[in-house]
Image (cartoon, helix red, strand yellow):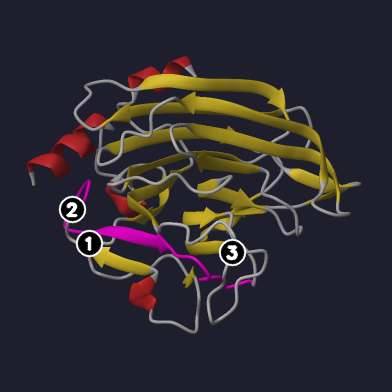
Amino acid sequence: MAAAAAALLALGAVPGSAGGVAGIDFRSGFDDGMIAPWHEVQRELDRPLSDSFRIVDSPRRTGSGAAMFIARQGYSDFGWNEQSELCCGPTPYETEGSDYWYAWSTLFGEPWYGPYRWGIFAQWHSKYGVPPPVDFNVGVAAISVQLHTGAVSLGGTGNWEYDRTFRLLNDVSPGQWHDFIVHVHWSAYDRGSITVWHRLAGDPHFKRLLRVRNVPTLQRVGSDVSPVYTLLGIYRASYCGEPTELGCTSPLGVQPDTIVYHDDFRRSTVRFPGCTICKKG
């Protein structure tokens, strides 16, 4: 209870609308043992759910539960790479000109084996079959934000008008909760922006790690601007070119499991009350 109260006070929780805080239109804390309001877990469907996803009472950031995501070699819903992700919320999806605030907590499991090449743990994905316009990426010893935005070409893996990677942290700090606050103005043109604040559990204050303005944050093909939907979990590059239901073999061997925990994801239409540092964003 003390940890939960501290986390709420840190964001200035006040009675309000959905989720108990003014402006919040989506909240997921897993305290009831359910994934709702998320729709589904994207994972290897031919294997037990518990192989890829569990709701646990420890570790947790707030309340009585948190979500545990496990990416395993050969476990793929789509036939390539490997994932365990919650999809697809919140709705309505983000569209041209919309403005939202997000907050959530992430813990990277111990011992930590950085994903091969890349490991996306939070993303906002378009309807196009190319990498997402905005994603949070974890590696062996760093956390970054990637933007693949603006006008896109759908051939191959895609080409983007705006293609940047911003390193946020040089330490993954396994076993510690990371608290993120993110503010995005969504636009497929140069009217977009993204700001990221962060703290480790126990730190009294958030620190602004990124502020990028006047850039696209959505993707478009010509004048067709795609909305985005949110996924939360872990999605990583596979040692195997094409994992199968029987797993896979690779000259690299077997990639260790990647285990990530998430808790208390929120989306708000306004700045989180009490987050005074966010006024500087």
Labels 1 and 2 touching (C-beta < 8 A)? yes
Label 2 sits on a secondary structure element that is loop
Amino acid type for the residue under numbered disc 1: Asp
Span of residues in magenta: 59-78
Task: Give the residue displayed 41% in from the left and 33% down from the top.
Answer: 181
Marks 1 and 2, Cα distance to the nearest angstrom? 6 Å
Q: Earlier in the sequence, mark 3 or mark 1?
A: 1
Q: Earlier in the sequence, mark 1 or mark 2?
A: 1
Residue 238 in sight from this viewpoint? yes
For this orientation, the residue located farthest to the top is 280
Labels 2 and 3 touching (C-beta < 8 A)? no
Q: Is residue 19 left or right of residue 216?
A: left
Marks 2 and 3, Cα distance to the nearest angstrom? 41 Å
Number of the front mark, 3 or 1: 3
Amino acid type for the residue under numbered disc 3: Ser
Q: Which residue has dot 1 on it?
A: 31
Main SS category, magenta section? loop
Label 3 sits on a secondary structure element that is loop
Q: Which x, y percent locates residue 142?
A: 46, 31
Task: Give the residue displayed 49% in from the left and 66% down from the top.
Answer: 73
Judge the density around disc 1: few (<14), some (14-19), many (≥20) Cα neighbours within 10 Å.
some
Q: Which residue has dot 3 on it?
A: 250
